[in-house]
């Protein structure tokens, strides 16, 4: 087996070009200035931050099915909207709570660290759910859910609506 080729000089200097561009753009937007000083300082930050945080990124991301990304995004928006309404109902009328909060165990098939990170973000931005714990072997997710009627149905929904598309995208 051949060793991987050494990284090209540009790739060594700019390991994440899209991240660098986003950081520079964010710097300029936050400072609301296109002055030479802000462009230079923003460029320094945009080049330095990805270099300093390279070890924190688990693996390079290769999106395998861009269509699945769009479908997942629409699913997350719909679910987040629905969850916002459900949580608002609970906050405005706490006596009308249908079911108690509980922890739900979700068996996981996905193993890609990037997919797990996206799953964590999806679960955390959806009102009424919180990522509680991931088993050491990454085979089980402990999820806290605000209202649990059927834990098995919730686990199946997470696997169907989020895990399966993430596996299409990342694995």
Image (spheres, grey):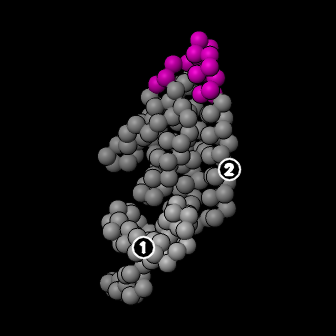
- Residue 94 shown left or right of residue 36 in the figure: right
Q: Quote the CA–CA distance across marks 2 and 1.
A: 37 Å
- Residue 78 lies in the magenta-colored region: no
Q: Quadrant of residue 50?
A: bottom left
- Residue 97 lies in the magenta-colored region: yes
Q: Residue 11 carries which label?
A: none
Residue occupied by mark 2: 74
Residue drawn where x is 68% and y is 42% of the image: 78
First in residue order: circle 2 vs circle 1: 1
In the image, residue 163 above or below residue 169: above
Q: Nearer the viewer, mark 2 or mark 1?
A: 1
For mark 1, give the secondary structure: helix
Q: Residue 41 carries which label?
A: 1
Question: Residue 72, position in %: x, y?
Answer: 63, 52
Name the outermost residue toward the top: 95
Residue drawn where x is 50% and y is 52% of the image: 118
Please provide the residue range marked out in magenta. Answer: 86-102
For residue 143, say whether it is visible: yes
- Foreground: 95 or 25? 25
Q: In which quarter of the image is residue 93?
A: top right
Question: Residue 146, position in %: x, y?
Answer: 52, 26
In the image, residue 166 above or below residue 3: above
Q: Are marks 2 and 1 in contact (CB under 8 Å)?
A: no
Structural crowding at the residue carrying mark 1, measured as other residues with C-alpha within 10 Å and reported as few (<14), some (14–19) or many (≥20): some
- Foreground: 20 or 64? 20
For mark 2, give the secondary structure: helix
In the image, residue 82 above or below residue 54: above
Question: Residue 15, position in %: x, y?
Answer: 41, 76
Total numbered badges shown on the rendered structure: 2
């Amino acid at each position: 087996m051949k060793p991987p080729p050494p990284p090209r000089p540009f790739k060594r200097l700019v390991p994440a070009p899209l991240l660098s561009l986003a950081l520079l753009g964010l710097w300029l937007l936050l400072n609301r200035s296109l002055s030479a000083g802000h462009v230079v300082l923003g460029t320094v930050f945009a080049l330095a931050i990805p270099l300093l945080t390279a070890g924190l990124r688990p693996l390079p991301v290769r999106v395998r099915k861009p269509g699945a990304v769009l479908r997942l995004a629409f699913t997350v928006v719909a679910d987040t909207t629905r969850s916002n309404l459900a949580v608002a109902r609970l906050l405005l009328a706490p006596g009308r709570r249908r079911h108690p909060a509980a922890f739900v165990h979700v068996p996981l098939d996905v193993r890609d660290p990037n997919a797990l990170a996206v799953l964590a973000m999806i679960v955390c931005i959806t009102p009424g759910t919180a990522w509680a714990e991931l088993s050491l072997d990454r085979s089980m997710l402990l999820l806290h859910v605000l209202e649990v009627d059927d834990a098995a149905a919730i686990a199946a929904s997470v696997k169907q609506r989020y895990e399966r598309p993430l596996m299409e995208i990342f694995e």
